Amino acid sequence: MDRLLASVDSALRTVAGSAHSARPYPPSLAAGPCVDDALDADARRLSGALMRVNHVGEVCAQALYQAQALTARSEPLRRQMEQAAREETDHLAWTEQRLRELGDRVSLLNPLWYAGAFGIGLVAGRIGDALSLGFVVETERQVEQHLAGHLERLPPGDGRSRAIVAQMKDDERRHAEDAQAAGAQALPLPVRGLMRLAAKVMTATAHHV
């Protein structure tokens, strides 16, 4: 019951946009005021759209890790999922703050994204710990590739967004490595393909809505 209540609390805080990071902005951004004078209107819109997509990814990450922690069969795996969720909360808070700085907003569909991801996480967790870990590995590898693409697309003058995305990319790679080391079982190729398709639909939608 305690874990269920914690999951509900996490869902409400995630969807309501009240995440707080344990870590400050990445080191290169922690000090000094936000100055975005180098960004024109088009650059701000592009940065805002990309950071909104990244924020949606973190909403989904919260849902996935909370669901997988709830269904984990071993205590070490539960703790690993909960630790990863805490680190993803930093990403959630960073992207939310950056959107405010850019004068942009989070996705209007965040409750839907959270609910869908939570359901997927429950299914993955119920199948078994090894496949649940495999799901983490595949998810984080796809997210890492997605963030690498955003580093290429973000305006050169948007150093703040680029630093956030770079730190997120490093964290996602580490989460995948940790899950692999914990005994992840590789997912079947069709499942990996479906995950990529679902991610494309989500990112294309969140770019605008």
Image (cartoon, rainbow, N blue to C red):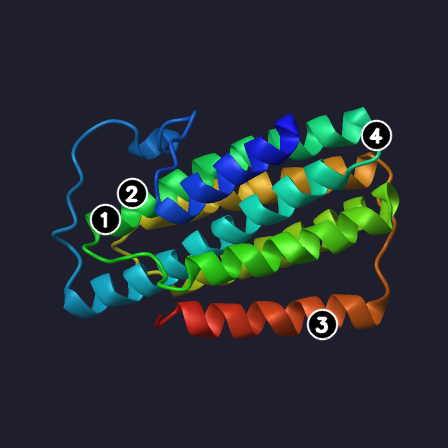
Q: Nearer the viewer, mark 2 or mark 4?
A: 4
Q: Are marks 1 and 2 in contact (CB under 8 Å)?
A: yes
Q: Are marks 2 and 4 in contact (CB under 8 Å)?
A: no
Question: Of the residues under marks 3 and 2, which one precedes in the sequence?
Answer: 2
Q: Quadrant of residue 29?
A: top left
Vertical relation: 16 (above or below) 23: below
Residue 78 spot, x, y in % from top left: 73, 31
Left or right: residue 150 versus residue 191 is left
Q: Residue at x 79, y 67 (%)?
A: 191
Residue 186 spot, x, y in % from top left: 86, 54
Distance CA(mark 1)–CA(mark 2) = 5 Å
Question: Of the residues under marks 4 and 1, which one precedes in the sequence?
Answer: 4
Q: Nearer the viewer, mark 4 or mark 1?
A: 4
Distance CA(mark 3)–CA(mark 2) = 31 Å
Q: Residue at x 78, y 37 (%)?
A: 72
Q: Residues within 10 Å of mark 4 (few under 14, many from 20)?
A: few
Vertical relation: 83 (above or below) 36: above
Distance CA(mark 1)–CA(mark 3) = 33 Å
Residue 107 spot, x, y in % from top left: 37, 61
- The residue that mark 4 highlights is 74
- The residue that mark 1 highlights is 100
Q: Residues within 10 Å of mark 3 (few under 14, many from 20)?
A: few
- The residue that mark 3 highlights is 194
Looking at the image, which is closer to me, 178 or 58?
A: 58
| Mark 2: amino acid | Gln
Circle 4: element type: loop
